[in-house]
Amino acid sequence: MSRPTIKDLAREAGVSVATVNRVISGAESVRQSTREIVLNAAENIGFYGLGTIESSVFQGRETHRLAILLQQGHRVFYRGLGNALLRAAEAYAGANISLELEYLDDLSPDHVASRITALGQTSESLGVVAAEHPMVSDAITALMESGVPVSALIGPLSARGNVGYIGHDNWKKGRMAGWAFHKCCPKPGKIGILLGNHRYRNQEINESGFRSYFREHNSDFVLLEPLPTFESAAVAREMTEKLFQEHPDMCGLFVSGGGITGALAALREHKPEEGFVCVAYELFDATRAALIDGTITMTLSYPLECFARQIIETMVKAKKAGPEAGAQRVNIPFDVHTSENV
């Protein structure tokens, strides 16, 4: 078969040969919508000058400068989310996305606040994962007052204006975890709870939903006071061992925060009795293996590709809408995994 010609491309796009030539040459007189039509047609027929057309189209597109602050890049979940965000930014249709992605190892409130301020000076829309703190709230307020919208990711954040939110309905997520213990435990008993930090509002809301489920459906379960892991695997292991020492009759463990690998190490060492239930968050190699070998009963996790697309789309909408439009809020459905569907 001969390769497609400019006439073939014009026919596929429904435009004149002259218009195709103007798109290829980068002429400013062609509307951006027409450039996009010609590009789609070129992709459909495998036109040999696709790269030139792409360059013409991309130059004419609007550019959105976004910045996103994630936590600790050594953690599998955040590294996976970051990679998904880069893919979503590259694939965004109709505009160019300039994405500045930063991982924070120093999670002290003053450092987080300083990075929010710094990135806000070079971006048009900011997304951030952070713990609730007055210093963080003040930095967000100042940024929003300067006209830059802020979206909280995973956990809600507060400021004097309305902060956007993109993440799970954390109350429902906590109730879903409660349902799992209620249905999977052979009989009611004590449930240990690990969370990362009380200042992460998503984890506080998770716990609230978790407790509300048992108040409504089975008050015979005893929900122990949550122990913080500070998102550390070593601390999570220590806290899990502490729970088993103080409550050897526990029937389950709810890991609502970071440090799951440490908790798994303690569970495997302790080898709880058959029927012990563990519910945790996020699906990656370690939790997948734990589902398969029975250490974890269920995980509730983010569908990362969907989550990343929604983050990019919502941050662009927030920029376009302007500060007077109010906060953009998107609830992301959570994936449920057991040993039977990983």
Image (tube, rainbow, N blue to C red):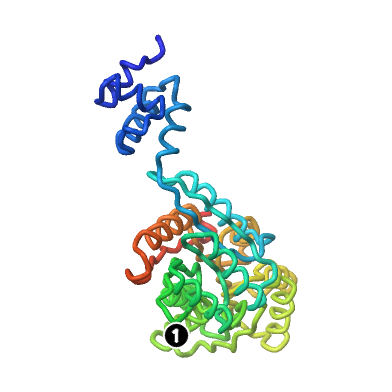
- Looking at numbered disc 1 in the image, what kind of residue is underneath it? Phe
Nearer to the camera, 138 or 189: 138
Tell me what residue is drawn at x 49 percent, y 54 percent: 65
Asked which quadrant contains residue 318, the reply is: bottom left
In percent of width and height, residue 212 lies at: 43, 85
Q: Is residue 286 visible?
A: yes
Q: Is residue 167 visible?
A: no
Considering depth in this image, is 278 or 34 the residue closer to the camera?
Answer: 34
Q: Quadrant of residue 200?
A: bottom right
* Rendering quarter of residue 6: top left
Circle 1 Cα neighbour tier, 10 Å, few/some/many (<14 / 14–19 / ≥20): some
Q: Quadrant of the N terminus?
A: top left
Q: Residue at x 26, y 21 (%)?
A: 16
Q: Residue 332: horizontal and vertical position, in percent?
A: 42, 63
Q: Is residue 65 left or right of residue 34?
A: right
Vertical arrangement, residue 214 with respect to residue 45, above or below: below
Residue lying at 56% horizontally and 57% vertically, measured from the top left: 81
Dot 1 falls on a residue whose secondary structure is helix
What residue sits 61% from the left and 80% below the top?
197
Q: Nearer the viewer, residue 81 or 107?
A: 107
Give coordinates of residue 19: x percent, y percent.
Answer: 30, 25
Q: How many marks?
A: 1
The residue at which mark 1 appears reads as: 214
Is 241 left or right of 101, judged from the image as shown?
Answer: right
Q: Is residue 107 above or below residue 134?
A: above
Residue 189, position as x, y percentages in the image: 55, 85
